[in-house]
Image: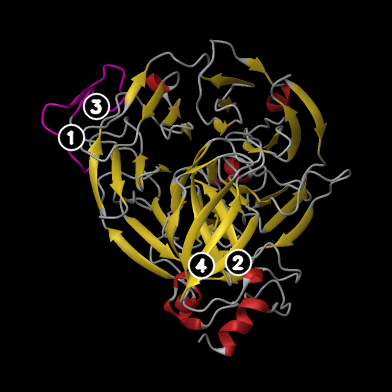
Amino acid sequence: MLSFFLLSLLFTTLSSPSTSQVVSPYPESTQGEWRLLHENIGISAMHMQLLRNNKVVMFDRTDFGPSNLSLPWGRCRNDPNDTALKEDCTAHSILYDVVTNNFRPLTVQTDTWCSSGAVLPNGTLVQTGGYNDGDHVIRTFAPCNGQICDWVEFPRALSRRRWYATNQILPDGRIIIVGGRGQFNFEFYPAGSNAFWLNFLRETSDENENNLYPFLHLLPDGNLFIFANTRSILFDYKQNRVIREFPAITGGEPRNYPSSGSSVLLPIDENIPNQAEVMICGGAKHSAFRLARRGTFLRATATCGRLKVTETNPAWKMENMPMARVMSDMLLLPNGDIMIINGAGSGTAGWENARNPVTRPVIYKHNRKSKNRFASMAASPKPRLYHSTAVLLADGRILVGGSNPHIYYNFTNVEFPTDLSLESFSPPYLSPEFDTMRPRILRADETVMYKNSFSLVFTVPTFIGMSSLSVRIIAPSFNTHSFSMNQRMVVLKVVRVWGIGSNFYGGVVSGPSTREIAPPGYYMLFVVHAYTPSSAVWVKIQ
């Protein structure tokens, strides 16, 4: 049986210490665990996407010069437009196998620097834009289990240059691509060759831009929440109409690149209809980028703001993180918590533009009523600054890579050298101390239909009861530049659970009610019991 001490941690709320301290809700032995997976994967993981076969596509950029990983013989890239190397026989993308911890090189032909991506309902990654000869390119990668799949590229497929743009999958299976450097417009994939003006993006560009990689979240009503710089709107992309503008975030500090805060749409709960809330954390002051170039590194932003966008008169509610943070990543964990990981305590995005690496992740418990919702985790031995990445894996770990990918893969004579390593972080819920509470999914329907029930079978050593059980789906996200595009969690309705043997249980769960709540595609399905998640199985929502 789980000790009374651990049970009390699961079901009680912490007291409220000052914001300068972090009191963890876990014993010291469960502050999470870091593991070095590879010291050198050959490239710097600037962009990362988990696929439905538990493999992760990673890539950096092609104008770096030779990487540390060779391409297979005969597959050199010949690019007369490349600014570093016209013929390159090294890889700038890999496919990482989570299960085997192995990786293999992939071939990209055009520059992917500061690009974006989303996954189609059939599981194919669509990757858009980049720099130089890649800024109008669409690339696709279809999951496979053999050694034959690779990037397929479509030159001039985008109507506008997409560099620092953001993608979002839509209820009809299309992808909307918003913004980019000097691009105050949006377009769709698949679609025609038209781009549509969005004046909000022009209005939010200041002297240091601070509105690149705008935060996009698809809301349950089918409209988009778009945040850029300090402002946000509710946007009807079908009619190209701003429905409303929300209040500017309290404090007036920018949150988008290069000030580089992060954002999540908090879990959508089918048991509590018609509610949606956005959370934004970290960032930098308006002048941080300009001053960092002169050697002055301002303290990063320490605040998080939450906005219930479905309220009649929404207002930002602010909280202080335990430490200031810029260039961090925010990830939805299977139990509903938020992981804040990577980043720096001062400066802004860009090579050598930041100082004071923040190596200690923080977990935020968004549904606690206490003012102190933050818990500090174990520190990583590696700083993860500009161009670091992080994604949630189906086994509940966080995969972490990248940082400061200098041109020519510079490892010397810089404050923070290029990092080619790959790590994993295991949150506290993976600690053996919670094994008696941990469910394991034995079977689940592979296809889930909207508004239809589906079944699953799971086992758990010590079942507390229905009130401690939930079933959740999480969409795998495309992560780059401190934002996880298309990240989404939906808490489903559990219709019934019954015992079918010693520690074995059957369940009936309702599928998502609408495509707006859960766009079609592949999701990780978790059973969460007493705050402890199972490993996920992949299901297709259609």
Badges 2 and 4: C-beta atoms under 8 Å apart? no
The Cα–Cα distance between marks 4 and 3, rounded to whole angstroms, is 59 Å
Q: Amino acid at mark 1?
A: Leu
The Cα–Cα distance between marks 1 and 3, rounded to whole angstroms, is 15 Å
In the drawing, what numbered circle is on residue 469?
2
Compare residues 111 and 307 and report the one nearer the observer.
Answer: 307
Name the residue at the bottom extreme.
Answer: 4
Inspect this view and state whether residue 279 appears: yes
Please identify, in this view, whether the residue under mark 4 or under mark 3 is nearer the observer.
4
| Sequence order check, earlier mark of 2 and 4 | 2
| Sequence order check, earlier mark of 4 and 3 | 3
As helix, strand or loop, the secondary structure at mark 1 comes to loop
The residue that label 1 is drawn on is: 71
Classified by dominant secondary structure, the portion drawn in magenta counts as loop
Residue drawn at x 56%, y 83% is: 6
| Whether residue 280 is situated above or below residue 163 in the rendered picture | below
Badges 2 and 3: C-beta atoms under 8 Å apart? no
Q: Which residues are magenta?
A: 67-88
Please identify, in this view, whether the residue under mark 4 or under mark 1 is nearer the observer.
4
The residue that label 3 is drawn on is: 85
The Cα–Cα distance between marks 4 and 1, rounded to whole angstroms, is 48 Å
| Sequence order check, earlier mark of 1 and 3 | 1
Please identify, in this view, whether the residue under mark 1 or under mark 2 is nearer the observer.
2
Name the residue at the right extreme.
Answer: 313
Compare residues 512 and 260 and report the one nearer the observer.
Answer: 512
Residue drawn at x 71%, y 47% is: 253
The Cα–Cα distance between marks 1 and 2, rounded to whole angstroms, is 47 Å
